Amino acid sequence: MHTKQDFLSLSNLTANELSSLLTLAAELKHQWKSGGNQPILKNKTLGMVFTKPSLRTRVSFEMGMRHLGGHALYIAPEEIQLGKRESVPDVARVLSRYVDGIMARVFAHADVVTLAQYSRVPVINGLSDDTHPCQGLADLLTILEYKGSVKGCTVAYVGDANNVTNSLAFGVTLLGGHLRVSAPEGYQLRPGVVARANEIAAASGGSLVQMTDPRAAVENADVVYTDTWTSMGQEAEAAQRAKVFPPYQVNATLLRGAHKDAIVMHCLPAHRGQEITDDVADGPQSALWDQAENRMHAQKAVLAKLLA
Ligand code: CP
Ligand code: NVA
């Protein structure tokens, strides 16, 4: 029996581990598009614990399990009431007696760490307040498809430096890419994330730079990335954030500063007219729908690696 592995943050991976997951994701995608995947997860079940809403994460994991011959169990926020009806360790102890893997979407990142600690089966982070590694993996797959390589690529993130940005920072630097994050003062990457990404970048030849000016970030960039100004759990700050973030809207004027072949990315859901305009989201440079599709392919690689 091998020791169980979890997938909690891209910052825990080596560049080789990350690259091999991406290679596997591309292979599984190709296989699926050319007729179907092998049932390598036959009779395996993924328990999916949600404490927040979801479209992409829920459906892409569910379909991914089905493609690989297994199935997924959706557990709604009000059922388990993680940490309220029952402690997080007890949920992990019990759930891992029934299923072969757990995917959890949580508020506090510590909850996904605790689940992994007390679970007998692999735990996958389906988004926490701190990170969104499944999104990060899909984002890298998308950049690879459009740009051929992440190494040497300049990615400009514009807006709130949030969980998605953290995973992007770890992923892009691991593969030797250059990430520029432009966010208002008070909404930038946390020092711990910057320190870890810089450590990774020093080994890979990548880089991370933070700034407040979105135009400087986007200048000649290969990828322009944005996300919501108010993440799940921050709803009480929405009005304040709506005052601070308008200069960080990804619109046609901002995009003109990027490389002419730049792609636009957004993890979705998009708040059209806020962080991104319709013309950009639906325009020729938008990679949004391929990016969303790639969640499924990227996660199938994680499932194959952890559960098979
Ligand atoms: N991008 C993403 O995680 O989407 P959902 O919140 O719909 O799962
Ligand atoms: N930053 C967003 C991502 C949603 C997929 C949030 O946490 O709400």
Image (tube, rainbow, N blue to C red):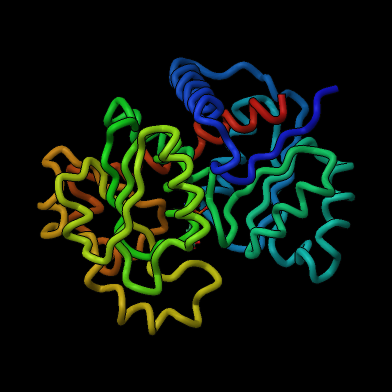
Rendered position, 171 above or below 148: below
In depth, the one of 2 and 59 nearer the eye is 2
Can you say whether 283 is above or below 44 in the image? below
**Which residue is found at the position 45% from the left and 54% from the top?**
194
Quarter the N terminus occupies:
top right
Residue 275 position, x and y percent, is 30, 65
Q: Is residue 2 left or right of residue 75?
A: right
- Image-quadrant location for residue 13: top right
Residue at image location 79% in from the left, 66% down from the top: 83
Left or right of residue 278, residue 127 in this image? right
**Residue 277 seen by the camera:** no
Q: Residue at x 42, y 43 (%)?
A: 292
Image spot of residue 160 (x, y percent): 38, 65
User: Foreground residue, 228 or 37?
Assistant: 228
Camera-nearest residue between 151 and 7? 151
User: How far across and down, in percent of the image, does residue 118 sit?
Assistant: 84, 49
Q: Is residue 135 above or below residue 236?
A: above
The residue depicted at 59 percent of the width and 58 percent of the height is 128
**From the image, which quarter does the C terminus lie in?**
top right
